[in-house]
Structures are given as structure tokens and as C-alpha cells.
Image (cartoon, rainbow, N blue to C red):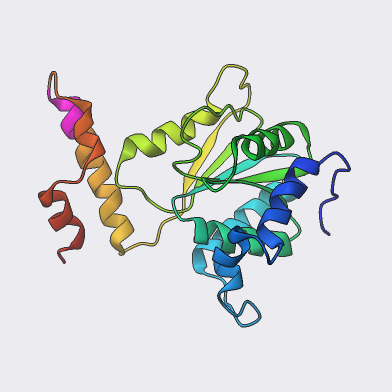
Amino acid sequence: PKAPRSSGGGSTTLVETMMSTPNTTEYRRSIINRIDMAHWKSSTKIEALVEELSRHRQGNANIKSIVFSQFVNFLDLIQWRLNRAGFSVCRLDGRMTPQQRNAVIQTFMTHPEYTVFLVSLKAGGVALNLTEASNVYLADCWWNPSVEVQAMDRIHRMGQYRPIKVTRIIIENSIESRIIALQVKKQLLVSSTIGRDKKSLDHLSSQDMQFLFTS
């Protein structure tokens, strides 16, 4: 059954309206408005996420999770699928105004019926405190490990008293496997070299590109 909507969730209603009203720029740009959703087939990743979140919901209906992705279109598809699985979802991405951003964060933190927060990886990397969540899902890989770590730190803040579980959802034997290997390589390089500038994590060298795309 679909989770109940809070009568006080006006902030999330604002965001949902922004994404669902045809005369808004956000709606026109959304992949949901550009493909035939009646014939769209969900991906392995999205179904794995739905399965995980459903399992958590069966064990504890109030457990909260954050899903990070670097792709706004992917978040659109995840949101569409989760809504149809009965989840009440909050959403934060770079298209939102500061007022909308603050309102949706407050809704997620204070309304127990909203159990999933979809967050654009970079939009959610700073100035967030999401200690109500205890599960983090990384829906895709970012080659810079520090970006992912910064995002995960959003729930490792003062006031967090729950154990935290972080899950990567990756496709084996794909470029994502190479991205994970590159992350490890960069982290080891920084940690093993005394005085090395950590800014080396923040850019892709020609060697990195060759590693990612050479079979």
C-alpha cells in the first residue's frame, strides 16, 4: 500500500508540482516527459534499489534512506518507479531554489512518512545535515572518491545515533568496475605519498582516461 501523505508536507508538494506541471521548465526537460513511460522498462539497477528499499520497509516502515546519483535524468526515473512502488519520496537537485532546497530537507527530516530522499550527488555534497537517514545508496559511480565521501558525510554528523550502511549499486564487468578501481588507485596514491596534494583527486589525467576506456 502507498505510504500516507502528510498534511504538513507542503514543501514537498511544491517540488512535486515543479516536476509535474507541464508549463514548467523542469517538467519539459525531464526525461519522464520525453519518453513513452507506458512502454518504459525499468533497469536492473532501479529494480535492485526498489527491492532493497522494500526490504527495509518491511522490517521498519520508518527507516529512512538517501539515494545519490550524479544524473538528474536517472533520479527522475528512480522517482517515477519508487512512487509506483508506494514510496513517499523527497528530492533535491541543482534545479531547486535555496528556498525549495531548505523546505524539502526540512520535510524529509521531520515527516516520518517520507522515507526516501533522492539527491543529486553534487547538489547534496555541501551544507546538508541528514542525520535522520541510516542508509545510503550510491546509484552510480563518480571517478573522484572525495565527492562520494563528502556526500556520505551528510549523515555522519553530530546527532547521528544510528548505525550507517552504505551500498553501491554497480554493474559488474562494466565501466563502473573500472571507475571503482580508479577510485582505489587514486586513494592509495594520495595516502602513500607524503605531502602529496589531495587536489590530484579532483581531476582526470590522460592516464586515467586511458585506464577507463581501454579494454
Q: What residue is drawn where x is 59% and y is 60%?
A: 25
Q: Is residue 38 left or right of residue 95?
A: right
**Quadrant placement of the N terminus:** bottom right
**Quadrant placement of the C terminus:** bottom left
Q: What residue is drawn where x is 65% and y is 63%?
A: 80
The chief SS type of the magenta part is helix
Is residue 60 in sight in this rendering? no
Rendered image quadrant of residue 131: top right
Q: Position of residue 130 (x, y in %)?
A: 60, 30
Q: Position of residue 210 (x, y in %)?
A: 13, 57
Rendered image quadrant of residue 195: top left
Q: Is residue 161 left or right of residue 112?
A: left
Rendered image quadrant of residue 11: top right
Q: What residue is drawn where x is 25% and y is 48%?
A: 181
Q: Position of residue 186 (x, y in %)?
A: 21, 38
Residues in magenta, as a range:
188-193
As for residue 150 lying within the magenta part, the answer is no
Is residue 3 in sight in this rendering? yes
Q: Pick whichever, 180 or 202, lies toward us.
A: 202
Q: What residue is drawn where x is 59% and y is 58%?
A: 26
Q: Is residue 73 left or right of residue 53?
A: left
**Image: 135 above or below 169:** above
Q: Position of residue 29 (x, y in %)?
A: 54, 64
Q: Is residue 126 left or right of residue 15?
A: left
Name, please, the residue furthest toward the bottom. Answer: 39
